[in-house]
Image: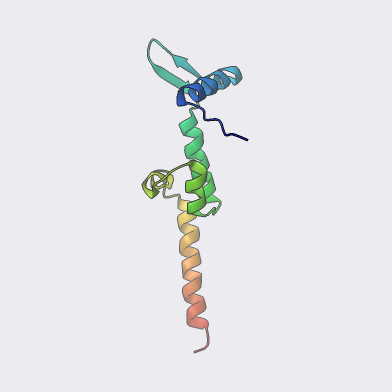
């Protein structure tokens, strides 16, 4: 089976049609602006949610289609809940190491 490639224009047109049909965004041709949900918003939210659920960062890169780590870092915001969990996990490791028999 031969893979077909979809041009960016065709994909954008399809997405715009679907977005309009479900009412999650519009395009104002005169102002040249979008309203509502954008594909970028969905992609960024997916990255944040995957990272928050402890999905491996390499896998998040592949899912998001990013080639460089720098792009993922833009979405890898310092979520206080994740930072607190990481510090707690690190603290537990130190306590366990100190309590281990020598």
Residue 13 drawn at (x, y percent)? 50, 20
Residue at the bottom extreme, as displayed:
102
Establish if 83 lies above or below 90.
above
**Which residue is the extreme one toward the top?**
30
Residue at image location 49% in from the left, 64% down from the top: 88
90 over 34 or under it: above or below? below
The residue lying at 47 percent from left, 81 percent from top is 98
Residue lying at the far front in this picture: please name it: 1
Which residue is at the far right?
1
Image quadrant where residue 2 sits: top right
- Which image quadrant: the N terminus? top right
Q: Is residue 101 above or below residue 4?
A: below
Toward which corner of the image does residue 19 lie, by quadrant?
top right
Residue nearest the observer in this picture, 46 or 80: 46
Q: How many marks?
A: 0
Residue 10 is situated, as x and y percent measured from the top left of the image, at 50, 22
Q: How is the image coloured?
A: rainbow
Q: Is residue 82 above or below residue 88?
A: above
Q: Residue at x 45, y 52 (%)?
A: 80
> Residue at point 50% right, 39% down?
45
> Image check: 1 left or right of 34?
right
């Amino acid at each position: 089976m031969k893979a077909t490639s979809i041009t960016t224009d065709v994909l954008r047109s399809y997405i715009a049609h679907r977005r309009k049909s479900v009412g999650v965004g519009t395009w104002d041709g005169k102002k040249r602006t979008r309203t509502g949900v954008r594909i970028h918003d969905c992609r960024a939210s997916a990255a944040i949610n995957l990272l928050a659920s402890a999905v491996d960062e390499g896998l998040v890169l592949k899912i998001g289609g990013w080639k460089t780590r720098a792009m993922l870092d833009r979405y890898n915001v310092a979520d206080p809940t994740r930072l607190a969990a990481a510090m707690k996990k690190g603290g537990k490791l130190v306590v366990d190491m100190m309590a281990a028999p020598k």
